[in-house]
Image (cartoon, rainbow, N blue to C red):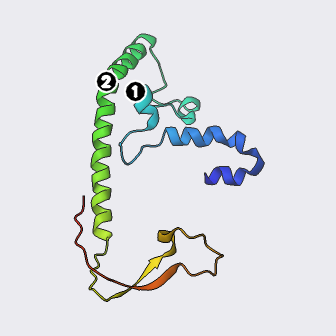
Amino acid sequence: MNRLGKAKGNWVDELFHVLWAYRTTVRISTKETPFCLVYGTKAFIPIDVTIRTTRTSNPEIRSNTKNLRKNLDLLDEKVEEAAIWKANYKALVERYCNTQVKKSSYVVGDLVLRKKEASRQEPNGKLDPNWEGPYQVPEVRLMECI
């Protein structure tokens, strides 16, 4: 998005490059690129086409077609493996976020503040306070995490 912001009025010319970069970048959560998950094979980046690499030199049509078909046959397994990686990554992020939560306990009679967002009031401006109160805690209820 930063590249599109710099392009100002020429963002249409840059959109292709931004989308290509997005589709060919390995995602942390799936360990695969979106292009690979859709088409079952790695994408050629433009530098591979202009500079001869082992992947682009001496292409054999028959073996290339056979390899592409093999990749398409293995696509379902690759998508399932990516889904497993994604679930593991989600659990890892959830575990990290849960360790960052600070537990707080209240006693009857404590004074607390409440965010204005909780009462759904419209802000009057940037100098308007973000909190309302103080309120006194009338009772303490134990809640279980779901």
Relative to 68, 90 lies left or right: left
Task: Kindly give the residue lying farthest to the front in the view shown.
Answer: 138
Mark 2, other Cα within 10 Å: few <14 / some 14–19 / many ≥20: few
How far across and down, in percent of the image, does residue 43 sit? 48, 31
In the rendered structure, find residue 79 and report the number of the disc placed on it: none
Which of the 4 quarters of the picture holds residue 96? bottom left
Residue on which disc 1 sits: 40
Q: In the current view of this chain or complex, which residue is farthest to the right?
A: 9
Residue toward you, 115 or 47: 115
Query: Which quadrant of the figure has residue 135?
Result: bottom left
Mark 1 residue element? loop
Q: Is residue 26 above or below residue 132?
A: above
Residue toward you, 30 or 26: 30
> Residue sitting at 24 percent across and 62 percent down?
145
Residue assigned mark 2: 74
Question: Contact, CB < 8 Å: mark 2 with mark 1?
Answer: yes
Residue found 33% across the figure and 32% down from its top:
79
Q: Is residue 53 above or below residue 135?
A: above
**Is residue 126 shown left or right of residue 131?**
right
In the rendered image, residue 41, in percent from the top left (x then y), is placed at 41, 27
Q: The disc labelled 2 sits on which kind of residue?
A: Leu
Count of numbered marks: 2
Q: Amino acid at mark 1?
A: Gly
Q: Which residue is rendered at x = 75% and y = 51% of the image?
A: 8
